[in-house]
Amino acid sequence: MAARNIVYFDLETQRSAQEVGGWDKIRDMGLSVGVTYSTERGGYRVYGEAQVNDLIDELMRADLVVGFNHLRFDYEVLHGYSIIDLTQAPTLDLMVDLQRLLSHRLSLDAVATATLGTEKTAEGLQAIQWFKEGELMKIAEYCCFDVKITKMVHEFGMNYKKVFYRNRFGTQLEVDVDW
């Protein structure tokens, strides 16, 4: 039996929620850069807006798409480009799963810092500024790192059946996961 193709995924946008008129207009934010890591391919792929259909195709062909808040955010950005319902792809949204277990939301940083000892290199609003400055390589590097962190958190959870996180008071806690 062939190994499953797990596709880890993240994207950044061209515009903020404020610029498009609110969080109910995520589809209008526009893709600046999307990044995947495919276990089948064993590497990363970077997509610009011109390659959005290739990105959607890769996600829909995956045996499992893993991301962090991609059900509500990243997929919704892509829904601005396609009639395909990406929520039909086999999906594990780590943020949604952790929220289900803990009854509150966590940031990727809260989990990655406690579990892996590493943190994100920037944040979404910085990536939007880079887009306006034409710094697409900076966005791609940042997005690749977020995909790498997501992959490492997922793999840690699969291997050890738990991940760690820091709560809003800075206390390190753990939660059992079944990934």
Image (cartoon, helix red, strand yellow):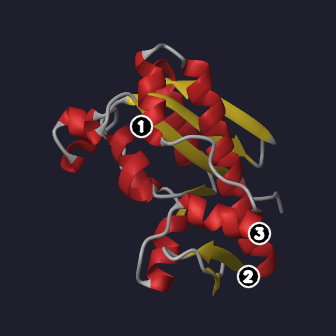
Which residue corresponds to mark 2?
161
Which residue corresponds to mark 1?
125
Q: Quadrant of residue 45?
A: top right
For marks 2 and 1, the one nearer the N-term is 1
Relative to 71, does residue 171 appear above or below in the rendering?
Answer: below
Residue 6 in view, yes or no:
no
For marks 3 and 1, the one nearer the N-term is 1
The mark tally for this picture is 3
Question: Looking at the image, do the residues carrying marks 3 and 1 touch, with CB atoms under 8 Å apart?
Answer: no
Which residue corresponds to mark 3?
156
Quadrant occupied by the N terminus: bottom right
| Tag 1 secondary structure | helix
Tell whether 134 sits left or right of 5: left
Q: CA distance from mark 2 to mark 1?
A: 33 Å
Question: What is the crowding at mark 1: few (fewer than 14 residues within 10 Å), some, or many (at least 20)?
Answer: some
Disc 2 residue type? Lys
Q: Nearer the viewer, mark 2 or mark 1?
A: 1
- Compare residues 121 and 70 and report the one nearer the observer: 121
Disc 3 residue type? Phe
Q: Quadrant of residue 54?
A: top right
Q: What percent of the width, then of the height, locates residue 151?
A: 70, 55
Relative to 146, does residue 13 appear above or below in the rendering?
Answer: above
Tell whether 115 sits left or right of 9: right
- Compare residues 93 and 110 and report the one nearer the observer: 110
Question: What is the crowding at mark 2: few (fewer than 14 residues within 10 Å), some, or many (at least 20)?
Answer: some
Q: Residue furthest top?
A: 134
Q: What percent of the width, then of the height, locates residue 65?
A: 58, 55
Relative to 150, does residue 83 appear above or below in the rendering?
Answer: above
Q: What percent of the width, then of the height, locates residue 41?
A: 78, 40
Relative to 45, does residue 154 appear above or below in the rendering?
Answer: below
Tell whether 145 sits left or right of 143: right
